[in-house]
Image: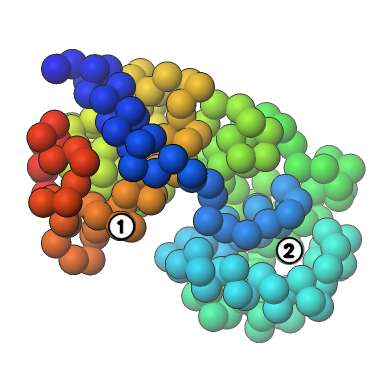
């Protein structure tokens, strides 16, 4: 089975296993997704979803957050960890959105990557979830599962995994594929406990590089 054939079968089976899939970060505006994905670094989405409620209770608009003292942002987002650097990036990002993009989150990779604290993972998430463009988000689940299953071979660097997956994942499947990898990584192919291979829908085709 070639990697393209393996990818096609993985996509098919995960679709059946997780028919409804989506980003697990709560947001109702593109700029809020940028805030949440920055806070999600080394933090669970569940905790981020709680913390941002407190943040938006004080600073409900993009303009409010851009004007907020960095120290105050840090106080609120501290439960997500790395509060100082995350607060600094969020503040600078919101200011740049207003000053250079008219308060609108860019719809292209080049401009998204120019924003403070925005890397390829964040930019791809925005491109896929907000703008409906093909996107491969190489978070920890995607990287772990791609290697275990055999879609990539011993590649750990997020951008290299992304580039390798672009060669075998159909563009129209890319966004939901990544969300389903997260679903599967949380439910079955776990990181902190032994993966539940006996319950896995990919058991017979997985390389099991655990």
Seen in the image, is 34 located left or right of residue 47?
Answer: right
Seen in the image, is 197 located left or right of residue 8?
Answer: left
Mark 2 highlights which residue? Answer: 91
Label 1, label 2: how far apart the Cα atoms are:
34 Å
* Image: 121 above or below 24: above
Q: Residues within 10 Å of mark 1 (few under 14, many from 20)?
A: few
- Name the residue located 68 percent from the left edge and 57 percent from the top edge: 27
Is residue 73 visible from the viewing direction of this image?
no
Q: Secondary structure at mark 2?
A: helix
- Name the residue located 35 percent from the left edge and 18 percent from the top edge: 167
Q: Secondary structure at mark 1?
A: helix
**Residue 89 percent across, percent down from the top left:** 65, 60
- Name the residue located 24 percent from the left edge and 30 percent from the top edge: 151
Q: Residues within 10 Å of mark 2 (few under 14, many from 20)?
A: many
Q: Please identify, in this view, whether the residue under mark 1 or under mark 2 is nearer the observer.
A: 1
**Residue 66 percent across, percent down from the top left:** 82, 63
- Counting residues from the N terminus, which is met first, the one under dot 1 or under dot 2? 2
Seen in the image, is 210 located left or right of residue 50?
Answer: left
**Residue 119 percent across, percent down from the top left:** 54, 45
Is residue 48 visible from the viewing direction of this image?
yes
* Image: 186 above or below 148: below
Give the color scheme: rainbow, by chain, secondary structure or one colour: rainbow
């Amino acid at each position: 089975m070639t990697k393209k054939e393996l990818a096609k079968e993985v996509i098919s089976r995960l679709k059946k296993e997780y028919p409804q899939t989506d980003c697990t970060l709560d947001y109702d505006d593109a700029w809020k997704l940028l805030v949440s994905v920055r806070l999600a670094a080394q933090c669970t989405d569940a905790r981020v979803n709680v913390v941002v409620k407190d943040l938006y209770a004080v600073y409900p608009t993009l303009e409010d957050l851009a004007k907020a003292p960095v120290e105050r942002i840090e106080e609120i987002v501290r439960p997500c960890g790395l509060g100082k650097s995350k607060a600094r990036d969020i503040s600078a990002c919101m200011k740049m959105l207003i000053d250079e993009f008219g308060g609108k989150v860019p719809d292209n990779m080049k401009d998204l990557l120019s924003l403070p604290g925005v890397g390829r993972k964040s930019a791809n998430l925005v491109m896929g979830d907000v703008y409906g463009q093909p996107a491969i988000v190489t978070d920890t689940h995607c990287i772990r599962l791609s290697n275990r299953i055999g879609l990539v071979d011993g590649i750990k660097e997020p951008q290299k995994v992304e580039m390798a997956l672009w060669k075998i994942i159909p563009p129209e499947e890319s966004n939901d594929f990544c969300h389903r990898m997260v679903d599967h990584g949380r439910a079955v192919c776990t990181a902190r406990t032994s993966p539940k291979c006996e319950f896995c829908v990919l058991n017979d085709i997985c390389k099991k590089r655990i």
